[in-house]
Image (spheres, rainbow, N blue to C red):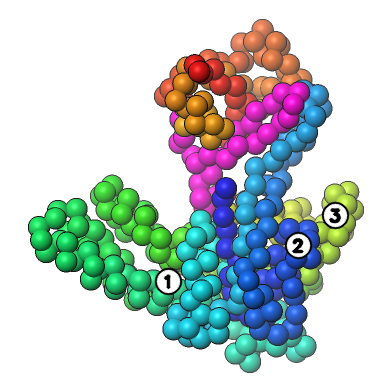
Amino acid sequence: MLRTGIVGLPNVGKSTLFNALTSAKNAQSANYPFCTIEPNVGVVGVPDDRLEKLAPLVNAAKVVPTAIEFVDIAGLVKGASKGEGLGNQFLANIRETDAIIQVVRCFDDPNTIHVSGKVNPIDDIETINTELALADMASLEKRIAKTSKVANSGDKNAKVEVKVLQTLYDKLSDATFINVEELFEDEDELKIAKQSQLMCIKPVIYAANVSETDVVSGNDYTKLVNKYAQKHGAEMVIISAKIEEELAELSQEEAKEYLAELGIENSGIEKMIQAVYHLLNLRTYITAGEIEVKAWTITAGTKAPQAAGVIHTDFEKGFIRAEVISYEDFLACNGSYAAAKDKGVMRLEGKEYVVQDGDIMHFRFAN
């Protein structure tokens, strides 16, 4: 399951946002640092209107969206890489995530204490990024020293690994997130870099947390964050954690009406999930029948056998063919597989077929 860490300085709205994400009050929220003592974990279904439209057409008993696991990690402070605040134990939680959502305070409120005494989103971002970079550099120093001993004995693979680790170490002196796809052209070097488990190579989204009045157009703070994100190859979404928390208390219909009143098409949470999918280059295919309509997450470029393996490894091992209908075609056929066959929009695809977003899939496999 996709795992995303929510990080930021204390009192920026992380736990409030986490409560909204999980629609539950299992993350404390208070006006003082470190009220989140253990990382809270919540599994959130990914909104997908396609599933809801398909379910009645195939008389599905239930709808199962794909999911993202969100981890609310205690507020980091300057010096966290050296054990300040709650220190390295929480940095370890970040290493285990696939992507990072950094919540950035973009609102003024004299009643909410800022850990550094003033609101400055770029300073906040750079404080977090510096701590992550310093922690990564400390980790790399140990690994370079260890791997260098093997490389000095003549091991060619170890020499390549040292080269990659040293390149990453040098780049981390900029205290920003690293796009390893751009940094390494060689496939072997890129593979080593991706397996390094560094925090600073993870895709990052800056969630600019604003007051209710700034959620539509943003403010001067969000402009600064957006400029920073664009410069560093990250994404930014504007959210109001307070609004998201209020939305979590409403029914779907009430939430839609509330968003319409605010002049917002999608909630901040939906924007964040879309940003995660975009950053990680993810796609969704669908299985649809009377038992359930279910979404499955794959990366762009995944071929049919590997997509089948997401359901069960036996499906990939024994893969024969995939029956494929595009979502639009299946909808036009009113969810009828027979009609899809008659109209010629159901295709039999082999091992080289690259699965597309929204494909309705049925796999044939040998036991």
Residue 208 is inside the magenta segment: no
The outermost residue toward the top is 342
The outermost residue toward the left is 154
Q: Residue at x 54, y 44 (%)?
A: 282
Q: Pointer 1: residues within 10 angstroms few (<14), some, or many (20+)?
A: some
Q: Amino acid at mark 3?
A: Ala
Q: Secondary structure at mark 2?
A: helix
- Residue 302: x and y in percent read 46, 35
Relative placement, left or right, of 303 versus 284 is left
Mark sitting earlier along the chain (1/3): 1
The outermost residue toward the bottom is 117
Q: Secondary structure at mark 3?
A: helix
Task: Pick the residue in front: 287 or 275.
Answer: 287
Residue 255, labelled with which disc?
A: 3
Mark sitting earlier along the chain (2/3): 2
The answer to whether the residues at label 1 and label 3 have Cβ atoms under 8 Å apart is no
Q: Amino acid at mark 1?
A: Thr
**Which residue has dot 2 on it?**
20
Q: CA distance from mark 1 to mark 3?
A: 37 Å
**Which residue has dot 1 on it?**
176
- Residue 222: x and y in percent read 63, 72
Q: Amino acid at mark 2?
A: Ala
The quarter of the picture where residue 109 lies is bottom right
Q: CA distance from mark 2 to mark 3?
A: 12 Å
Range of residues picked out in magenta: 277-303
Q: Is residue 96 above or below residue 187?
A: below
